[in-house]
Amino acid sequence: MTDPERRFAGTAPHYAAHRPGYPAQAVTDVADRAGLDGSGRVLDVGTGTGRLAVAFADRAGEVVAIDPNPAMVERARERVSHTGVANVTVRNGSDTDLGDEGPLRLTTIGRAFHWLDQERTLARLAAMTEPGGGVALFDDEGWLLRGTASWQATVYDVVSEFADPPERTGPQTYERTWADVIRASQFSGVETREYEQEQVWTIESIVGYVLSLSYCDPVREEREAFERAVRARLDGPYERTATVEATVGLLGE
């Protein structure tokens, strides 16, 4: 079992139900940038529960979605079935076994690029991508560690009573961004756009989101006690404006 498989064991149902989706405008802009006209092939790496794969289905001729976690693959297949899209195939796989997925018009990676062998993966994707096609990375702030609202800090404090989460840092800037990583590859014309997304968080969705996190296995083992502790300190719902980034690089631009 790979490290991501171990870390995400048991998270799939919570991930499917409580992870926020991606802004529709971000999907539209990325599809336009990559020249998706309903006939190209899209590869979604680290698909999780299939949100991006399904979101791009109506702009692609075919979508191949891969994830190393069998439970995630099952949830992604359920999403495909429930939404009724006919051109999405979901299978077990990861960045380490890419080979015959091309020719690709676009590869999407949502909230998973940090798990991958980034330089090697981009090189393999470039070899499978059509001229003018590209790669798109989607990411957000990860509010438990970086959100600044008092209710977010309270949730972190409760999580810390049950598990050992990464340090809470607040908003961060990085010396090397995902855009810089793509620029160092064969993809060029790299551009990052930000999209605001209005969200409403109830106690149920807060708890579900925490249970979807890879480092919260001890919390999942004591779910009822954790939920009681959250309800004792918070009442909700809470509104927030989240920022989602989409970074796109094209081959041959």
Image (tube, grey):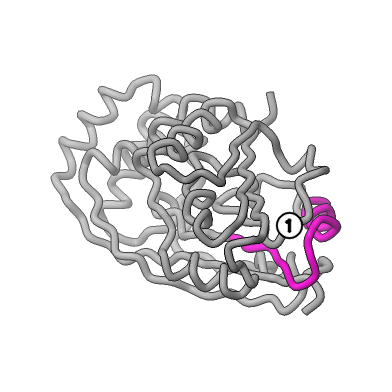
Question: Residue shown at 55%/60% (left/top)?
Answer: 138
The image shows residue 182 at horizontal and vertical percentages of 74, 67
The image shows residue 117 at horizontal and vertical percentages of 76, 47
The image shows residue 48 at horizontal and vertical percentages of 53, 40
Range shown magenta = 120-137
Question: Residue shown at 59%/68% (left/top)?
Answer: 37
Question: Residue shown at 28%/62% (left/top)?
Answer: 240
Above or below, 162 relative to 99: above
- Horizontally, is 224 left or right of 209 in the view? left
Nearer the observer, 102 or 163: 102
The image shows residue 105 at horizontal and vertical percentages of 70, 62
- Residue density around tag 1, few if under 14, some if 14–19, many if 20 or more, within 10 Å: many
- Secondary element under disc 1, as helix, strand or loop, is strand
Nearer the observer, 8 or 48: 48
Q: How many marks?
A: 1
Q: Is residue 126 magenta?
A: yes
Above or below, 172 relative to 46: below
Q: Is residue 89 magenta?
A: no
Above or below, 56 relative to 163: below
Which quadrant does the C terminus fall into? bottom right
- Horizontally, is 230 left or right of 243 in the view? left
Question: Residue shown at 61%/29% (left/top)?
Answer: 5
- Residue that protrudes farthest toward the top in the picture: 221
Which quadrant does the N terminus fall into? top right
Q: Which residue is mark 1?
A: 104
- Horizontally, is 168 left or right of 205 in the view? right
Q: Amino acid at mark 1?
A: Leu
